[in-house]
Amino acid sequence: MRNLLSRLLSFFRRPSVKTLADIRGIDTLRKFLGKKIYYNGAFVGELEKIIADKNNKSPKKIIVKTPSNKLYKLKPRLVVIENGLLKLSKKLPDLPHTAEKKLVENEKIEKHSAEYLSSVEAIVNEIKKLRDRILKLDEKLIDGEIDLKTFKIIRKDLEIKIQELTRKGKEPIKKLKDHLRTVYKQKMLLEREVERYKVKIMLKEVSEEEIKGRLEVLNDKIGELDTEINRVKSIIDTYEILSSETTREEFLISNEMLTQIFES
């Protein structure tokens, strides 16, 4: 009797696991559309569609879309909501291990791209600081606050540091350009999907209300990709302008020219 009572108490004390089946309300359900879904830490797809009960506004079925554009109809209780993430409690039937591995690799690529961006931003900021120091040094020479010999030593040292930073930035810049092409492609695919939905609405294959949530998610993602494109493009352009300027002859003053100007 005690064992039975103990088991009953432990059952009721278990923390409740929230799934999509527990969500109520059309507006609340719409917020989950387009969200990424994971299985054992691997990204497996996005929540493409929710089929809700008209009476109690609860989800009856959900559609998951994989990166290969396969659609799976699942029970909402199979998707667990944990710390804001959607996790499958059951593996999709024909998602092979190699596909899971590739999806994890894609997540790693995104992480590395952020690291490359951060690295180039740091290089650009350092080059700007060194250029400012060179300009101030030039002014000191012109104003007679520093002798030519000291000027040459300090300026040469600053020029070498800038050239080293420029070389250091070449590899991450190459990776960022690859990343930029990928993001452009993702944006184009999403824009095409939006256009397809608009055509379906025009042909009355679907109602605007029916896919309103999906369109909102797609437009939000396009906006996020636009922000990413502008940020990456801006840092690439800034790096290339700075690196080209710091290798021009007018920036790299020769010793012979300096001697002619200041010792004549």
Image (tube, rainbow, N blue to C red):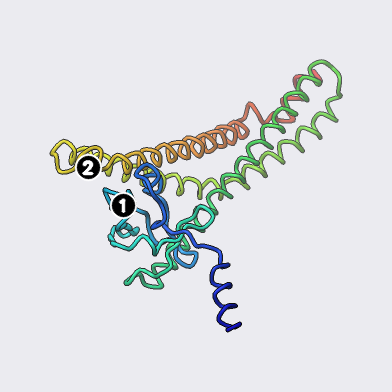
Q: Is residue 16 left or right of residue 128?
A: left
- Residue 169 x %, y %: 60, 45
- Residue 174 x %, y %: 51, 48
Q: For the point 39% across and 70% down, which residue is it?
A: 91
Q: In this view, does 263 lie to the left or right of 117?
A: right
Mark 2 vs mark 1, CA separation in Å:
19 Å
- 138 vs 252, nearest the viewer: 138
The part of the image, by quadrant, that contains residue 193 is top left
180 over 154 or under it: above or below: below
**Residue highlighted by disc 2:** 196
Residue type, label 2: Arg
Other-residue count near label 2 (Cα within 10 Å), few / some / many at <14 / 14–19 / ≥20: few
> Counting residues from the N terminus, which is met first, the one under dot 2 or under dot 1?
1
**From the image, which quarter does the C terminus lie in?**
top right
Q: For the point 48% across and 68% down, which residue is it?
A: 40
Q: Which residue lies furthest to the top in this view?
A: 143
* For discs 2 and 1, the disc positioned in front in the rendered view: 1
In the drawing, what numbered circle is on residue 50? 1
The part of the image, by quadrant, that contains residue 117 is top right
Residue type, label 1: Ile
- 1 vs 83, nearest the viewer: 1
